[in-house]
Image (cartoon, rainbow, N blue to C red):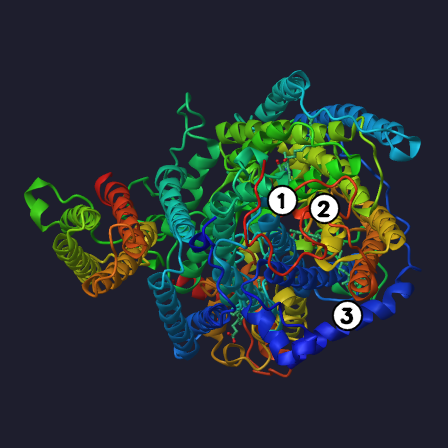
Amino acid sequence: MLKRAKALFLSLLSLVVSLPALGSAVVETSTRQLNMPQGVTEVSQAAYDIHMIMVWVCTVIGVGVFGFMFYVMYAHRKSRGAVAENFHENLVVELLWTIVPTIILIVMAFPATTALLKVYDTDNPDIEIKVTGYQWKWQYEYLGEGVKFMSELNTSLDEVYGREPKGEHYLREVTEPLVLPVGKKIRFLVTGNDVIHSWWVPDFGVKRDAVPGLFTSGWAKTDEPGIYVGECTELCGLGHAFMPVVVEVKEEAEYNEWLAGKKAEAAEYASTIGKQWSAEELMVRGEEVYERSCAACHQSNGEGIPGVFPALKDSPIALGPMVGHIAVLIDGVAGTSMQSFADQLSEVDIAAVVHYERNAWDNNVGDVTQPLDVLNYKQSK
Amino acid sequence: MSEESTYYVPEQSKYPIAAATGFGLMAYGAATWVIDSSNPYILILGTLVMAVVMCMWWNTVITENMQGLANAQLKHSYVLGMLWFIFSEVMFFAAFFGALFYLRVIVNSWLGGDAAIGIFDDTPTDAAVANNAILWPGYEAQWPVMETPDQAANGDAAIFKGPDQAMSFPGWANIFSWLPLWNTAVLLTSSFTVHIAHTGLKNNNRKQFVTWLGITVALGLIFLVLQAEEYIEAYQHMGLTLDSGIYGTTFFMLTGFHGAHVTLGTIMLMVAFFRSLKGHFTHDDQFGFESAAWYWHFVDVVWVGLFLFVYVLD
Amino acid sequence: MAHGPATLADGWKAYISRWVFTTNHKDIGTLYLWFSFAMFILGGAFAMIIRAELFQPGMQLIKPEFFNQMTTMHGLVMVFGAIMPAFVGLANWMIPLMIGAPDMALPRMNNLSFWILPFAFAILTSTLFMEGGGPNFGWTFYAPLSTTYAPESVNFFIFAIHIMGASSIMGSINIIATVMNMRAPGMTYMKMPLFVWTWVITAFLLVAVMPVLAGAVTMMLMDINFGTSFFNAAGGGDPVLFQHVFWFFGHPEVYIIILPAFGVVSQIIPTFSRKPLFGYSSMVYATAAIAFLSFVVWAHHMFTVGMPIAGELYFMYATMLIAVPTGVKVFNWITTMYKGSLTFETPMLFSIAFVILFTFGGFTGLMLSIAAADMQYHDTYFVVAHFHYVMVAGAVFSGTAAIYYWLPKWCGKMYNETMGQVQFWVAFIGFNIAFMPQHFLGLAGMPRRYADYGLQFADWNMVSSVGAFIYGGAQIMLLINVILTIRNGKPVADEKVWEGAEGLEWTVATPAPYHTFEKPPEVK
Ligand code: HEA
Ligand code: HEA
Ligand code: CUA
Ligand SMILES: [Cu+2]
């Protein structure tokens, strides 16, 4: 309690002290985009169009209303000798300004409806992709293709905390982007694994909530290859700002090549899983995995956040039998934010991170966790 | 304006701050207690403070009333207060009935994969189909939900398991052993008896008033006993608990809150009963009794809704 | 009731017990107002932390988990602690004066409604110091982030909301009973000042929706602690159920915030136009229409959760309709000024700014209601900009106007006009610098509740933060002005205070005596 009070006080203090200093580091890559992007799909174009219609309708009404108001404020001020009249009712004008806006709105409803119909036109897709939100990363699964992978932020915490200069793609880069072909209608089936996230790619006009236990669907079809960046737009915990969406749209041939590559990768991986890894290899890989997938909660130093995320340093599980430790990762801890990593990490990665946790931060258990141990646990279930 | 009809504005009072303190303690204590069930003390303290203050407060109000401080206008304020309070209770139940409706009708068909695109087009939506095919394979939309989506997809590993048996209509053969029916009969009768009591009071028939009020209290108690019996039955023999999926959830929350309100209503009626024994209330001064009676009718109406939507309609 | 209220001269014990045990509507109104100002400063301090962190990309001052707590607490404290009690305070002070009643209908319950609040907010803010931190799931506390994934302190949050809701319900019942039962002879419904009208309708909304909020938090409580599955699809529930229940409360809530503000402005504009309010009866009907519509539009906050299209269309159309009665109000205000004899004292300046900025915020609201476009706006800073235009430039501006307008009546002293006007301009300019750029940020793609953001959003965020600090400064000026007025403002003796003011509240002495209308006045 005292500690938190101190933290609160310190942050307030540092706020006051550091304000002048902050101004100096104006970032140069800032764009001055003011308006909604037109995007590259029918849906985003439809959203843009109806948005612009609304902007203009409101502008015209606004100019009229405020124009009149300013005129009144100028012409009927007491200092110019205005004397107040006493009227306070006029049925005709009152009806008029009820009916006219109603008509404007009814007219507006037509384009608004057509635009919405477009958003909901998810029928007959060429490709179906399941998008799952995890705390704090995305998983993409190409339904029917046997390809699935995680996509998570690739900006280092050092950049976030200002220990390193921020790169050009700060918070807009991921380990592996979603890859799509041009000219194909793609249906996104979006769901969540833990809490609600929301998958948004502005240039596609697709923003769908990832509700755990239920799907929402959206679609996109574009002819323009390129890299499109989006965000998670539903508050999902402390990593909410750190789970961007990156989509790479490729020519069809390149896409097919990429897909074939992914399939081959999966096949190759299956064949290497039986390999024995050395403790050093595991430590290196484990640290990588840990920083990427676990440090957000359990912190880089393994000390967690008291009261929310347990410390792994000296934790009974990390120091206890290896099977128990693997079990936590495979099964998760029901009812907490410690999710199952069985679907998110490969056996090799799980083995590596378990090994890392058992031997980092003076945990020094000394055993070596092999991918086979993980596989065995999975199969024993 | 005659002197008597001045609106009585009480002098300073210590009750509000004491009640607020009790209320604050209750809130703090309740939170402490749900986190750590071995520490109910703050909650108990708060409840005690609250109970004592409330008794004293109402006592004062009754005394003021007996002293003739409360004129017709003030009494009308009390009436309005009570009616709007009942309205707020209606809205509280509305939230739970709304939730029940949404879960039964809408969510169920989403999870079951047969939610239609629109009113005129009954092809299932792609999201609903995917829900059923990918997330909850094997789940069939049903009410009561006897097998939860979790069970359908994960079998025995499921965390949420449906009940063995539901509380719905057991068929004509077993109708007499169906507790909810008895409960309905008891509660409907009690609404009627409280009305007879009220008529008695209006006609200055004290005996009729006291007797029928007493009968109403008794019926309220019988209802509570039957309800308790039903819960015991559910927990011990039907595998129906608070955590047996959405059916158990909605069943216990709706009937539970209703039961809590019946308890409150019974207490109010009981107080009115004891006051009536002491000769309180006359045909033109009956707010304390009337408010309890209104409350009772309200509780009764809620039950009718419950009986229909929780027990009868499948 | 011969003796007056205890003052400091009677000793501090008497003074304290006067305030703590009071049953006087004016005392209670004052308590509400000071409490709400304290909460405004607290909520504002949280906002300053948010804006300081967002001054630049990267995490500089606080950690993301603390940022989320700040966002949440800022929203909760501002909505429930600052704005709502402020208007209840005004209602307490003004409604009995306006309808010629000796006090509120249920004076002791009135005091209880107030004293619950400090307890509720003490519990709420104390969660910040608990293990695991305070609420970090947004003021909308969507499940399952607020249930399965919440820190333990969420239980305190739940019960704090419960008692705070009870306080609101009692307060509202009191207002309804007062208005229905305590009007002076001759004060028919259609003669009541508009502030009274907007407040009865608000009170009705409160009594209708606070219990629904209580239902929502109760469901959370059960899901967290007792194994139910309201918000868990595995058991047959649905996380989206939470959103439906919450917004059934939440949308009317935003009108609860704005309707009394409409009332205030409808009192002030006629005064400084020296002309009766234009379209009184259409104002009343419009308010009722807004209140009615507010019950049937809630899911416009949920356009992206995947409702069936029929639902989306319905909620879109229904929401668009609210522009009509709201427009009627705007037009009536402007026509009230038309051919009046206008002067621009501080309350009038704030009211005019209210009309302009609120309408602007209303326009963006209308844009948000277009479901297809909301797919792009939703949960971005465009929404944040929208609701600060309606809530800060709406509710807070009108509240400030009300303080300047009625302060002389309350304490019998005149505020410093120059300082008031300076404060207005600082607030007006600061506000627009703070929140106008947020529209651009949102359209360019910056999501809300982000502790950190990409470099492309850097410039506007910096501008916005600077504006926010300026606006915060303006609030300090308000505080200083009020305190200076109370301590050594120029005494006003005239009952009317303002040349153009009409209504019963301007017939009692200035400052308003402790007890007024012990004998009901006769209204022609
Ligand atoms: C005081 C509070 C207040 C008020 C008054 C309003 C008023 C309106 N709001 Fe707003 N709103 C909020 C507070 C408020 N809102 C808050 C807090 C949120 C975010 C909650 C959260 O997620 O945290 C929100 C979010 C919100 C959303 C969800 C956005 C999203 O999350 O994606 C929507 C969508 O429809 C919306 C719409 C509207 C509309 C149509 C109005 C209308 O009432 C506006 C009507 C007014 C006018 C239109 C202007 C005047 C009219 C005329 C001059 C007449 C002529 C005009 C025309 C015919 C165009 N609001
Ligand atoms: C009526 C309600 C209300 C009011 C008055 C305000 C007032 C302000 N709000 Fe808002 N705000 C909300 C309701 C309100 N807000 C809600 C509901 C949310 C959504 C929360 C959520 O997402 O869950 C929100 C969210 C929100 C965000 C988005 C946070 C995020 O998404 O992460 C931001 C960011 O700029 C913000 C800023 C401000 C600012 C700068 C003010 C200013 O107007 C405040 C001005 C007041 C003061 C500053 C206090 C007085 C002065 C002092 C304390 C002295 C110190 C001053 C200085 C050091 C300058 N608010
Ligand atoms: Cu995931 Cu926000
Ligand atoms: Cu709304």
Chain on which label 2 sits? C
Q: Using the numbered discs, state the Cα–Cα distance from disc 2 to disc 3 in whole angstroms.
A: 30 Å
Few, some or many C-alpha atoms within 10 Å of disc 1 (few <14, some 14-19, many ≥20)? Answer: many
Rendering coords of residue C512 (x, y %): 68, 56
Please name whichever residue, A295 or C456, is drawn nearer the observer in this view of the structure: C456
SS for dot 2: helix
Name the residue that disc number 2 marks.
C398
Name the residue that disc number 3 marks.
A12
Residue type of the residue flagged with mark 1: Pro
Q: Circles 1 and 2: CB distance less than 8 Å?
A: yes
Q: Residue at x 91, y 59 (%)?
A: A23
Rendering coords of residue A377 (x, y %): 44, 66
Q: Using the numbered discs, state the Cα–Cα distance from disc 1 to disc 2 in whole angstroms.
A: 9 Å
Mark 1 or 3: the one toward you: 1
Residue A77 seen: yes
Rendering coords of residue A381 (x, y %): 38, 62
Mark 2 or 3: the one toward you: 2
